[in-house]
Image: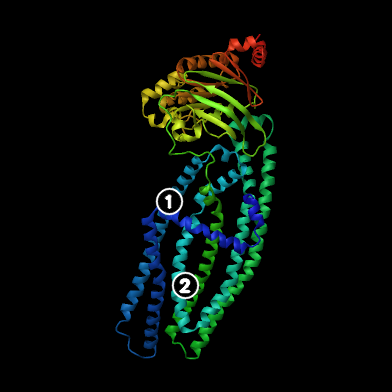
C-alpha cells in the first residue's frame, strides 16, 4: 500500500493525529542533536517566563488591597512601595527573559535547520538509483525537503507548550483553590474549540498530501516555461500559452480546495469560538457574583479575574499548540519515513577492499536485469569478461542494455539474477566506496556543476582538489586545458550562468571538462558512456585517440555510436535484446559479416 492509499484509508482523523504524535520523540532527538546547550537554556528561560505572570498577579493583589485600605481611611502598609518596586522588577525581568527566549529560539531554529538539512542531504546520498526512479519517492523526497526547513513552527510550538502548560497550571490551581467551578467552566468552553481546530488541522494535512503531485507539476511548468534551457523551444513552438494554461488549471484546482477548507474552518470554527467566549464570561460573572456577595475582597477579585484571563488564554493556547504540534507531526511523517529508508544496494562498509592491482578482471556470469517497477528484462543471461589491460567497446541499438552494463559493473544496481565477479569474487562482497574509488566513469548526461573550472574537474577526486599539478594533468589528458586557457579566470573561473560572473561553455567544452574528472580519478577501470555525443567527428576521434593512449595497460569500457572510434577497441561486444550476440575485434567482426558488419556498413554509407 502506497502513502496515498494509507491516507485515503484512514477513517478517523483523531486516530491519525494520535499516531502522528509518535513522530514527536524522534524530532525531539534530532532537535537535541542540533544543539543540546541551546535547548537546555531555552527550557530554563521558558520556566521562568511561565511562572513570572503568576507572581506579578499575586503582588498586584496585595497592592490593590493596600490601596483599597487607604481609600477606607487606613494607614498605608509599610511594605507598599516595596511591593510596587517588586512588580516593576518582575515585569522588567519578564520582558528581558522573553527577549532571551526569542534569542535562543532563533539560535535553535538556525541550528536545527542546518542539522536536519545536512541529514536530508546525507540520506539522499545513501539511497541508490532504484529509489530515485520511483515517482512516489520523489513526492516523499519533495515533502521531506520542505519539512526539513518548514517545520520550525513545531520546534517553537513545543517550547511554547511547556511554557503555556506551566502558566496554565499555576493559575488553574489558584482558581481551583477559590472554586473548582471556575476551572470547569473554562475547560467546557475551550474543549469544543480545540476539537474543531484538531479536525481542521487533519483535513489540512490530507489536502496538502493530495496536492503534492500537482504542486510538483506546477514547479516543473514554472521551470520549463522560464528556464534558459527551455527558452528556445518554448518560443519557437509557441508553448508559453500551453504551459501557462496548464499551470493555471492546476493552480485553480488547488485554490478551490484551499478556499473550501478555509470557508468551512471560518464558519464552524467561529461558532465553536463563541462557545469558548461564553465559558470565559461564565467564570467571570461567577467571580463578580461571589465578590458582590462578600466572599472575595477587591484584591482577590482583581487576582481571580486576572487568573481567569490567564488560565483561559493559556488553556486555549495549550489546546491550540497541542493541536498544532499534532498537525506539524503529521507533516513530519514523510521526513521521518525518508530518514528510515534503506538503500537496496548494500554498501557493505566492512566488505573487502578492491585489490591494488586487479589480476583477473570483471566477469558477468549469467546476468539478467530488469529495472524496478518494470517487467521488461534489459539483460538476459548476459556473459562477458573484461580483463586487465583490455579495452572493450559496447555497441548496439538504443535500449539494448549498454548503459545498464555500466550501471551494473559500477554497482549502481545489483543484478536481478546471476553474478558480477571481480577477480572471482562477487562484487557485493566488496566495499562499495572502495569499488567506486577504483572506477572512473563519465556518462552522456554528466552533471554541469555551477562551480569553478577547478571544482568541476576536482569533483572527480575531491581529495586532490588542491593539487594544481594533478588538475592540470587531467585537463591536458582530456583536452580541457585548451578550454581553461580561454577562460578569463582560468581554473578559478565560475562556470554556468546561475551565479554572478559565471561563463557558459559549449556542449563540447563541457564534455572535455567532464572527461578531465575521469582522468583525475586515475582508476583501474575507466568507463566512457557516450560522453562525446556533443563533439564533432574530428574532435571525438581526437578524444578517443588520447583515450586509447592513456588507458594503455588499464581496463577500459567505452560506448559510442561512431564506429570510427569503436574500431580502436581491443574487443567489440555487440548487444541485441539484452544478450551478447557477437564479440571480437573490428577485423574479425567485419570478416564474419554479422550484425556489427551490417551496422558499420550502414554508418559508413552515410559518409560517402
421 w.r.t. 393: above or below: below
Tell me if mark 1 has few (under 14), some (14-19) or many (20+) residues whose alpha carbon lies within 10 angstroms of its own: some
Residue 359, visible in the rendered structure: yes
Going by the picture, which residue comes out furthest to the left?
78
What is the number of the mark on residue 110?
A: 1
Q: Measured from the top left, where is residue 434 in percent x and y?
A: 43, 33
Q: Residue at x 55, y 35 (%)?
A: 414
Q: Measured from the top left, where is residue 254 in percent x and y?
A: 66, 51
Q: Is 209 left or right of 343, judged from the image as shown? A: right
Q: Nearer the viewer, residue 218 or 408?
A: 408
Total residue callouts: 2
124 w.r.t. 193: above or below: above
116 w.r.t. 452: above or below: below
Q: Residue at x 62, y 29 (%)?
A: 379
Q: Secondary structure at mark 1?
A: helix
Q: Residue at x 50, y 35 (%)?
A: 428
Q: Residue at x 63, y 9 (%)?
A: 591
Q: CA distance from mark 1 to mark 2?
A: 29 Å
What is the number of the mark on residue 168?
A: 2
Tell me if mark 2 has few (under 14), some (14-19) or many (20+) residues whose alpha carbon lies within 10 angstroms of its own: many
Which tag, 1 or 2, sits closer to the chain's start?
Answer: 1
Q: Measured from the top left, where is residue 352 in percent x and y?
A: 43, 34
Q: Secondary structure at mark 2?
A: helix
Amino acid at each position: 500500500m502506497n502513502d496515498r492509499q494509507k491516507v485515503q484509508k484512514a477513517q478517523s482523523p483523531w486516530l491519525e493525529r494520535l499516531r502522528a504524535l509518535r513522530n514527536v520523540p524522534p524530532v525531539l532527538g534530532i532537535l537535541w542533536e542540533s544543539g543540546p546547550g541551546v535547548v537546555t537554556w531555552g527550557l530554563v528561560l521558558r520556566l521562568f517566563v511561565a511562572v513570572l505572570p503568576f507572581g506579578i498577579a499575586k503582588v498586584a493583589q496585595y497592592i490593590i488591597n493596600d490601596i483599597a485600605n487607604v481609600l477606607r481611611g487606613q494607614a498605608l502598609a509599610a511594605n507598599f512601595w516595596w511591593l510596587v518596586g517588586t512588580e516593576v522588577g518582575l515585569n522588567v525581568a519578564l520582558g528581558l527573559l522573553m527577549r532571551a527566549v526569542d534569542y535562543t529560539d532563533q539560535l535553535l531554529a538556525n541550528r536545527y535547520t542546518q542539522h536536519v538539512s545536512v541529514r536530508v542531504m546525507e540520506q539522499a546520498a545513501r539511497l541508490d538509483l532504484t529509489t530515485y526512479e520511483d515517482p512516489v519517492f520523489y513526492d516523499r523526497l519533495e515533502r521531506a525537503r520542505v519539512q526539513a526547513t518548514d517545520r520550525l513552527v513545531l520546534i517553537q510550538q513545543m517550547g511554547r507548550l511547556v511554557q503555556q502548560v506551566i502558566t496554565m497550571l499555576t493559575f488553574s490551581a489558584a482558581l481551583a483553590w477559590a472554586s473548582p467551578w471556575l476551572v470547569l467552566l473554562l475547560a467546557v468552553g475551550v474543549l469544543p474549540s480545540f476539537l474543531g481546530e484538531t479536525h481542521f488541522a487533519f483535513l489540512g494535512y490530507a489536502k496538502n498530501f493530495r496536492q503534492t503531485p500537482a504542486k510538483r507539476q506546477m514547479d516543473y511548468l514554472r521551470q520549463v516555461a522560464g528556464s534558459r534551457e527551455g527558452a528556445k523551444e518554448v518560443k519557437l513552438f509557441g508553448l508559453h500559452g500551453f504551459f501557462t494554461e496548464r499551470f493555471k488549471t492546476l493552480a485553480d484546482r488547488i485554490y478551490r480546495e484551499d478556499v473550501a477548507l478555509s470557508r468551512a474552518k471560518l464558519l464552524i470554527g467561529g461558532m465553536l469560538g463563541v462557545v469558548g467566549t461564553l465559558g470565559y464570561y461564565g467564570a467571570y460573572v461567577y467571580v463578580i457574583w461571589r465578590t458582590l456577595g462578600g466572599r472575595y475582597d477587591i484584591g482577590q477579585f482583581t487576582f481571580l479575574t486576572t487568573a481567569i484571563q490567564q488560565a483561559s488564554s493559556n488553556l486555549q493556547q495549550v489546546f491550540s499548540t497541542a493541536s498544532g504540534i499534532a498537525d506539524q507531526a503529521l507533516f513530519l511523517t514523510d521526513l521521518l519515513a525518508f530518514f528510515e529508508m534503506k538503500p537496496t544496494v548494500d554498501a557493505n562498509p566492512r566488505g573487502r577492499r578492491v585489490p591494488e592491482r586487479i589480476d583477473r578482471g570483471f566477469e558477468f556470469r549469467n546476468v539478467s536485469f530488469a529495472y524496478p517497477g518494470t517487467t521488461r528484462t534489459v539483460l538476459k543471461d548476459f556473459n562477458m569478461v573484461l580483463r586487465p589491460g583490455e579495452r572493450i567497446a559496447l555497441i548496439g541499438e538504443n535500449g539494448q542494455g549498454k548503459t545498464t552494463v555500466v550501471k551494473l559493473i559500477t554497482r549502481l544496481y545489483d543484478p536481478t539474477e546471476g553474478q558480477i565477479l571481480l577477480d572471482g569474487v562477487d562484487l557485493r562482497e566488496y566495499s562499495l566506496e572502495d569499488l567506486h574509488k577504483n572506477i572512473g566513469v563519465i556518462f552522456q548526461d554528466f552533471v554541469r556543476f555551477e562551480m569553478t573550472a577547478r571544482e568541476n574537474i576536482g569533483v572527480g577526486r575531491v581529495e586532490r582538489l588542491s593539487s594544481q599539478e594533478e588538475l592540470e594533468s587531467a585537463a591536458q589528458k582530456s583536452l580541457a586545458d585548451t578550454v581553461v586557457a580561454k577562460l578569463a579566470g582560468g581554473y578559478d573561473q565560475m562556470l554556468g550562468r546561475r551565479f554572478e560572473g559565471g561563463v557558459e561553455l559549449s556542449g563540447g567544452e563541457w564534455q572535455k571538462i567532464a572527461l578531465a574528472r575521469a582522468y583525475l580519478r586515475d582508476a583501474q577501470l575507466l568507463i566512457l558512456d557516450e560522453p562525446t555525443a556533443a563533439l564533432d567527428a574530428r574532435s571525438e576521434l581526437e578524444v578517443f585517440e588520447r583515450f586509447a593512449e592513456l588507458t594503455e595497460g588499464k581496463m577500459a569500457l567505452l560506448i559510442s555510436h561512431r564506429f570510427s572510434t569503436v574500431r580502436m577497441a581491443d574487443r567489440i561486444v555487440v548487444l541485441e535484446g539484452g544478450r551478447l550476440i557477437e564479440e571480437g575485434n573490428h577485423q574479425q567482426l567485419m570478416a564474419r559479416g554479422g550484425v556489427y558488419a551490417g551496422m558499420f556498413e550502414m554508418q559508413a554509407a552515410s559518409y560517402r
